[in-house]
Image: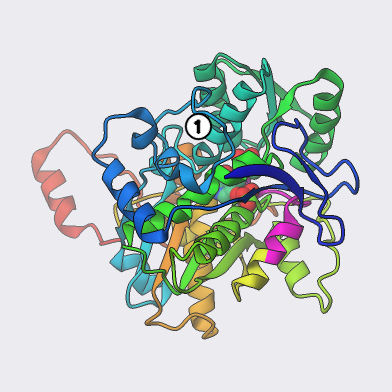
Amino acid sequence: MSAELVCFSEPCRARFPITDPIYSCPQCGSLLEASYSGDHMPAQMLKTLWRGRRTSNAPLDQSGVWRYREMIPFLDNYDAVVTLREGNTPLLPAQKAAQYGGLDFLTFKHQGFNPTGSFKDNGMTCGASQAVRLGMTRVACVSTGNTSASMAAYSSAAGLQPIIFIPHGNISYGKLAQALEYGAKTFQVEANFDQILALVRTLADKLGIYLLNSVNPFRIEGQKTIIVEMMDQRDWNPPDWIVLPGGNLGNTSAFGKALRELRDWGLIAKTPRLAVVQAEGSAPFYDLMHTPDRAALTAVPHPETLATAIKIGDPVSWPKALHEVVCSGGVVEKVTEQEIADAKAIIGLCGIGCEPASAATLAGIRKLTKTAVIAPDADVVAVLTGNVLKDPDYIYRYHTAQLDAPNGMRIKSTFANQPIVVPNDPDKIAAMLETSPKIL
Ligand code: F0G
């Protein structure tokens, strides 16, 4: 198959070589996407090939991204690939969460099982590999945390110099620590995510640094495989709904592209509906979906949420995400800080756990079943985007009734699980065990 970069804007649709180091259309400024032409293997052959690779010891086959390389054929050979065996993330049924969300049954696809603990690894293996292929030496990103952790790991693994820009004081230590440990040059900028993205785009152009934010079309290609793997794990039976948190909206764009391509290639027979969930204080995409003409996104100038991963007021990928949500017959919901915090504790009680942004999914499901948008017997997969250990400070504060929302209001610790200080006395501890209440 041959690969090109194509402008996403319908009236433009300009085409560029796949090796051009560009992130937006030089003619009209819109987003770019990778586009493929030529024959592909028949669907049944692909399914058999991919299933067979699961028993292989070859690094490319062990990666839950490159195993599906026929769906992301942008490299002309695989020497450039840098893989940490990303993907391979489980589908986990969660009964307590289903009940809380108003569903008979619910499955989580947990991207927090990735090498650096978030779904960013699925995209970063592709972005970093493209950087190597292009002969780049330095790569950069702005991040609310997970992108930087992932970029630092993959770039260092590939021998590239990672340069990271993060909003000062607004990312969790679980993420910042990873960036430092993986050797990234880390700049904490006194500005918010949206402002820093503009800064980094200017710097990248000026200094010839390759940009690995989700505007990078190859990141989107890698994130598509989250959906391909999900379908493979479900024996190619699509769910009714796929629920995910929305921040910069790269993942929404990737999931929609994957669904369209899987359908075009005859790998799935129906398209699941996408439900994107945003935090109330940072919900420009929700607002856009609820304007009559959906013509342009109005940025939220000062986004606020404790779910810092999705604290983004001006998401760059909104045109793609809008297209994908509409194509899938999907919806966008928003949830409060309290709803996120309680949903997160419930996911924890399933023995699963996730970071705050991920828990927006269950909070959104609870709202969407209450308003009968999602039926109780619907087949729903929610994507947990990040690992529980990414943000331990949030967890400790919630369980010890010290978690304050950005507006200063104390969040109610509905499902609190306080650590208990006890004397060194077995009888007293035994008595306390008998009397201490159950959380749920
Ligand atoms: N969940 C987590 C855990 C994230 O880290 C992010 C984004 C999202 C959801 C939202 O995904 O941007 O594709 O809509 N984190 C980015 C970062 C922005 O810099 O790590 P999106």
Horizontal side, residue 302 vs residue 154: left or right:
right
**Magenta stretch in the rendered image:** 306-323
Where's residue 71, x and y in %?
Answer: 50, 49
Residue 280 sits in quarter: bottom right
Q: Nearer the viewer, residue 206 or 38?
A: 38
Residue found at the far front of this picture: 39
Q: Nearer the viewer, residue 229 or 78?
A: 78
Horizontal side, residue 382 vs residue 29: left or right:
left
Where's residue 69, x and y in %?
Answer: 47, 42
Q: Disc 1 designates what residue?
A: 174
Residue at screen point 48% across, 71% down:
241
Residue 130 sits in quarter: top right
Q: Is mark 1 within 8 Å of ligand 1?
A: no
234 to 17, vertically: above or below: below
Residue 405 visible at all: no
Horizontal side, residue 216 vs residue 55: left or right:
right
Q: Quadrant of the N terminus?
A: top right
| Amino acid type at mark 1 | Gly
How dense is the environment of label 1, judged by Cα within 10 Å: few (below 14), some, or many (20 and up)? some
Residue at screen point 83% across, 37% down:
198
